[in-house]
Image (cartoon, helix red, strand yellow):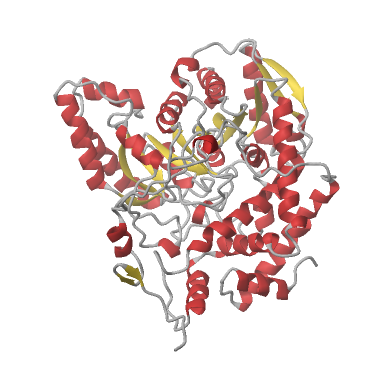
């Protein structure tokens, strides 16, 4: 069966080839067959999907115009709040948590006609790069079941790659959308910081967290982002900057655009197979008439250290709320403080505890200046690298990950080694700029590689336009 | 060694986090390695650099358009309490904190 696209769904509905209800039922059947081996969905929401498909089918029956995502079956990462649907963050501490409200992004997707099938597995509180930190077991990569799908939004990437949703939402703090997109061979986008409201996103690191889409093609990524982007009074960091018309920009020729190739990203440590595919991707842009320009981003090598100070510091503060009082797990004790300690000790997994300890340490008296303040200063230098680059180029091309999807269990024993593989994605996270990972061939025809495109802040349209051009030029089969 | 067993204990206390003996030593060693790596930031002279405390520039964020400070009814209170570990509407119940 050919894979569905957002427009394909709408056309089939209008032509009465299938109803929204039948389509959702068809997806649930596929999920039932495939999810046991992938472990990508944690919770399904058939009742909520049914209410939405009834609305869409009524619109079709009345011959009324359909909203942009009408009938499209989608999935939501389990760190994003969905009213009435269990939302665990991949953690035991929120095992039975049912949010009383929807995230703004969820609200907007449903208002645009999308049908939410369920919630997807992820690293606990979005902390991880392989999905192996979920309290509910790892997700498998649909391209190679013995390998990881990437993380932390591994479930959201896997369900789209496996045809168990037409599109999905993930979240990206240091690469958690782009890297799983790369590992699963689908386009995956993080808009600029502030472009999409974080209201209802369960916080990991508030100055870095962003919600963004996965889809099977760049046009659908653009359609999803179009719906969720824009100012939200409930998130004071959501920007008032105007949302561009992404669809209108997609088909514009890329000839003459100046693309920066940062030497600093192509240094040691990159897998030879990844390098070969990414260089082929860059060559494709040259053939399309883009001008390639060597640039320097001199603080790249400091990004991982900076990121793991800032992200863990913010996490240690954000995760203070899990105290066994208002929601989630409680481990009883006669003393309130002992109840806090036991609840948190029992409820959090290893990676989350490690980051809470590190984050608390870098913020603690006597160490704040040496770590947290230093991190904020180097973050400013990294952001400046990007601003300087964008005075010379329209976009920046890099690999998404230095390595292809690795085997389950291969990297779990050494956290620092796992962190170091985030090198190409954390820079853009720290700088606040938009980035996409777009398929750029498969190593030995099996292991997907992603090419990352960064644009200047609020330059989402340019990023999408370039990704679309690579896709049309056969990027996935390089 | 950048971080000692006592440091980890102190920090875990600050974070209200029970750690087992095994966890204590494992995290200490792993965090020690991470802090060692973070040392590389000291290669950079940042004396004259302003820390980046906000991602958005003035004019991009909503700071200039703060909403009115209005009291609005919270219609979800019942729902919130329903999912609490030990609710006693309209309160959350916790172990006794005041000695009589």
Residue A276 in percent (x, y) is at: 67, 29
Residue B58 placement, left or right of A231: right
Name the one closer to the observer, B47 or A80: B47
Task: Answer whether residue A295 is visible to the viewer in this image.
Answer: yes
For the N terminus of chain A, give its image quadrant: top left
Name the one closer to the observer, A421 or A63: A63
Residue A151 in percent (x, y) is at: 53, 47
Q: Is residue A360 above or below residue A64?
A: below
Q: Residue at x 43, y 59 (%)?
A: A136
Residue A421 in percent (x, y) is at: 66, 46
Task: Answer whether residue A443 is visible to the viewer in this image.
Answer: no
Residue A105 placement, left or right of A47: right
Which picture quadrant has residue B92? bottom left
Name the one closer to the observer, A276 or A156: A156
For the C terminus of chain A, give its image quadrant: top right
Q: Is residue A471 above or below residue A177?
A: above
Q: Residue at x 25, y 45 (%)?
A: A48
Residue most extreme to the left = A62
């Amino acid at each position: 069966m050919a894979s569905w696209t957002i427009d394909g769904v709408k056309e089939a509905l209008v032509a009465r080839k299938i109803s929204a209800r039948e389509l959702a039922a068809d997806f649930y059947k596929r999920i039932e067959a495939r999810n046991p081996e992938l472990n990508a969905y944690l919770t399904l929401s058939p009742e909520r999907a049914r209410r939405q498909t009834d609305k869409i089918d009524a619109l079709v029956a009345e011959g009324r115009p359909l909203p942009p995502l009408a009938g499209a079956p989608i999935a939501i990462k389990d760190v994003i709040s969905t009213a009435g649907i269990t939302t665990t963050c991949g953690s035991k501490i929120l095992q039975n948590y049912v949010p009383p409200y929807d995230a703004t992004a969820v609200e907007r997707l449903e208002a645009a006609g999308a049908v939410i099938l369920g919630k997807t597995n992820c690293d606990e509180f979005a902390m991880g790069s392989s999905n192996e930190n979920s309290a509910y077991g790892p997700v498998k990569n649909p391209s190679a079941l013995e390998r990881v799908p990437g993380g932390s939004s591994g479930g959201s990437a896997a369900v789209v790659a496996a045809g168990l949703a037409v599109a999905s939402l993930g979240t990206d703090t240091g690469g958690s959308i782009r890297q799983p997109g790369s590992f699963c061979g689908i386009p995956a986008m993080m808009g600029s910081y502030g472009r999409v409201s974080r209201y209802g996103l369960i916080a990991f690191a508030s100055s870095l967290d962003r919600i963004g889409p996965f889809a099977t093609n760049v046009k659908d990524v653009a359609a999803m982002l179009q719906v969720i982007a824009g100012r939200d009074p409930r998130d004071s960091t959501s920007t008032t900057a105007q949302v561009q018309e992404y669809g209108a920009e997609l088909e514009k020729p890329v000839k003459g655009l100046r693309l920066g190739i940062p030497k600093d990203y192509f240094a040691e440590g990159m897998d030879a197979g990844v390098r070969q595919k990414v260089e082929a991707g860059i060559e494709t842009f040259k053939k399309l008439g883009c001008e390639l320009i060597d640039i320097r981003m001199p603080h790249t090598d400091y990004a991982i250290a900076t990121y793991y100070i800032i992200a863990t510091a913010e996490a240690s503060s954000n995760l203070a709320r899990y105290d066994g009082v208002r929601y989630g797990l409680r481990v009883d004790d006669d003393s309130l403080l002992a109840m806090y300690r036991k609840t948190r000790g029992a409820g959090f997994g290893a990676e989350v505890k490690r980051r809470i300890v590190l984050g608390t340490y870098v913020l603690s008296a006597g160490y704040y200046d040496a770590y947290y303040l230093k991190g904020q200063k180097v973050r400013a230098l990294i952001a400046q690298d990007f601003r300087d680059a964008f005075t010379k180029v329209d976009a920046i091309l890099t690999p998404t990950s230095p390595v292809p999807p690795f085997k389950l269990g291969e990297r779990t024993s050494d956290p620092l080694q796992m962190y170091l593989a985030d090198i190409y994605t954390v820079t853009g996270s720290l700088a606040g700029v938009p980035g996409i990972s777009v398929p750029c061939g498969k190593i030995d025809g099996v292991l997907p590689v992603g090419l990352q495109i960064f644009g200047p802040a609020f330059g989402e349209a340019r990023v999408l336009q370039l990704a679309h051009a690579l896709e049309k030029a056969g990027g996935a089969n390089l | 060694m950048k971080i000692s067993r006592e440091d980890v204990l102190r920090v875990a206390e600050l974070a209200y986090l029970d750690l087992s003996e095994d966890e204590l030593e494992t995290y200490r060693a792993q965090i020690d390695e991470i802090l060692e790596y973070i040392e590389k930031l000291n290669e950079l002279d940042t004396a004259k650099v302003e820390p980046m405390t906000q991602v958005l520039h003035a004019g991009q964020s909503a700071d200039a358009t703060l909403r009115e400070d209005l009291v609005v009814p919270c219609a979800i209170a019942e729902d919130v309490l329903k999912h609490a570990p030990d609710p006693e509407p309209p309160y959350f119940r916790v172990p006794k904190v005041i000695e009589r």
